[in-house]
Amino acid sequence: MRWALLVLAALAACGRGADVIVVGSKNFTEQRILGELLAQTVESVGLRAERKLDLGGTFVCDAAIRAGQIDMYVEYTGTALAAILKEKPEGMDRAQVLARVREAYAKDGLVWTAPFGFDNTFALVVRRDAEEVRTISDLAAHPGDWRAGFGYEFKERADGYPGLAQAYGLELAEIRIMDLGLLYRALVDQKVDVVAGNATDGQIESLKLKVLVDDRGYFPPYEAAPVVRRVVLERYPKLAAALEGLGGRISVQGMRRMNYEVDGGHRGPSEVVREFRTAS
């Protein structure tokens, strides 16, 4: 199976033509925006970007870049450490997590360029009228009272619900596996009482929701950064410099705002990214 994937990847690469960079993304709003940002950055240095956005979850994108089916996508440091490398971040700060994933990925010819500047950690979100809870510990103090809405990855990943439940002794009355795009609407419509989102989700502010404090510091850093095949950076130095130039350019508030423009303002990612690039 692995051999077959490599052959398919080689054939796909041969069919691209010169100066074509394949950009991938996961299948949620922020990833579509960041994938589009990478694609427009590729185009800004005179190369052609082939967009393969909305590929799927973490493991799909990771397999695609390792097989050479895509040349770059945006990953999160905590996700790479826990989900891909199967390592625990205990005792590691942000810089140490980044250094570790860079070291491990380099062995497979993959480079983490400069992080964008925001940390998109997992977030447990409730309605603002849930006055009895402010922290995740508060949630755990009411076992069996909460109906949860989770995406598949959060439910299954070691750094998601399984580890969280163990760390906090969390017991939920019900867990519904839902499409990520439906989580917040289900929360507002009171079909669930708590959802697992991300710190930069635009709907948190627009729908007047509340993020519970991770008072035990369970979630690791999730700095977003481009992961790129080394051969691409070596072949195109101008692209390497342009990607490094994205480092530190996006704050949590800035990313949340772009997410809201797409989700709440119903604008296309390409338009939102063009506006961001013009203003920054």
Image (cartoon, helix red, strand yellow):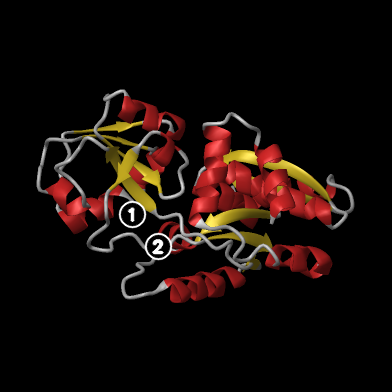
Residue visible at 38% across and 27% down in the picture: 185
Furthest residue toward front: 279
The reply, left or right, for residue 218 in relation to residue 71 is: left
Of the residues shown, which amino acid type is indicated by label 1? Ala
Of the residues shown, which amino acid type is indicated by label 2? Lys
Disc 2 is placed on an element classified as loop
The reply, left or right, for residue 120 in relation to residue 194 is: right
- Which quarter of the figure has residue 115? bottom right
Q: How many marks?
A: 2
Disc 2 + disc 1, Cβ < 8 Å: yes
Nearest the camera: 96 or 55? Answer: 96
Residue annotated with mark 2: 86
Residue visible at 44% across and 71% down in the picture: 94
Label placed on residue 158: 1
Q: Position of residue 184 (x, y in %)?
A: 38, 32
35 vs 108: above or below? above
The reply, left or right, for residue 45 in relation to residue 165 is: right
Nearest the camera: 95 or 56? Answer: 95
Label placed on residue 1: none
Disc 1 is placed on an element classified as loop
Question: Crowding near pointer 2: few (<14 within 10 Å), some, many (20+)?
Answer: few
Residue visible at 45% across and 43% down in the picture: 201
Mark 2 or mark 1, earlier in chain: 2
The reply, left or right, for residue 12 in relation to residue 117 is: right
Note whether residue 232 is visible. yes
Residue visible at 57% across and 31% down in the picture: 265
Question: Crowding near pointer 1: few (<14 within 10 Å), some, many (20+)?
Answer: some
